[in-house]
Image: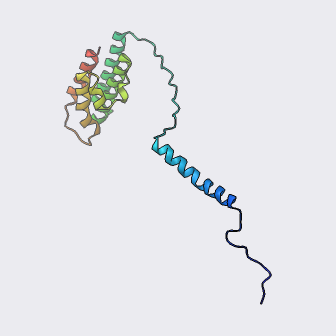
Amino acid sequence: MQTSVKLQDMMSYSLLMTIIAIVLVLAPVIILLILKLVKFQPKKKEKKVKPVVRPKIDPSKLRMMYLEKIKEIETRYATSLIDMRQAHIELSEAVREYCSEASGVPVKAYSLKEISVLGKPQLHEMVREFYEPEFAYDSDKDIKASFSKAREVVNSWK
């Protein structure tokens, strides 16, 4: 039986088309390799941070405001509205907020290691001591000493 279809030779199509196909496949690979070799890093867009303008509060008024906050936490603990763990959490928050407002340094978001670099040993010591009662299920920490320590940090901050 004879066929009416005649097959072309394998290499009878245009050599130009073969070269174009090879270039299209290899070009991206070669470009990526070159970029990797020169360690190309695309430029990251920097976010423009708007400075937060805080009203200047008299340091003594600010100190009194936060000492009052500590007294409020102590009263809520004494009347059993909060437990010891919650009292430590709120004390730590209050003192960190005070230090942030008084200095402009975002101490509230700092880790213990970052606080140690600030050169404020009383704050570092207080935060370190409060970690255990803040995060433990049960603690035998002396809460009265914690209130005293928090007041001491607020009063000594400059």
Q: Is 14 drawn above or below residue 48 in the view shown?
A: below
Question: Which coloring applies here?
Answer: rainbow
Q: Is 9 drawn above or below residue 122 in the view shown?
A: below
In x, y percent, where is residue 99?
33, 20
In x, y percent, where is residue 61?
36, 11
Residue 22 relative to residue 5: left or right: left
Residue sitting at x 34%, y 28%: 93
In x, y percent, where is residue 5?
78, 79
69 or 127, which is in the foreground? 127
Residue 140 relative to residue 12: left or right: left
Residue 86's image quarter? top left
Residue 116's image quarter? top left
Residue 82's image quarter? top left
In x, y percent, where is residue 147?
25, 25
Residue sitting at x 22%, y 39%: 139
Residue sitting at x 52%, y 37%: 42
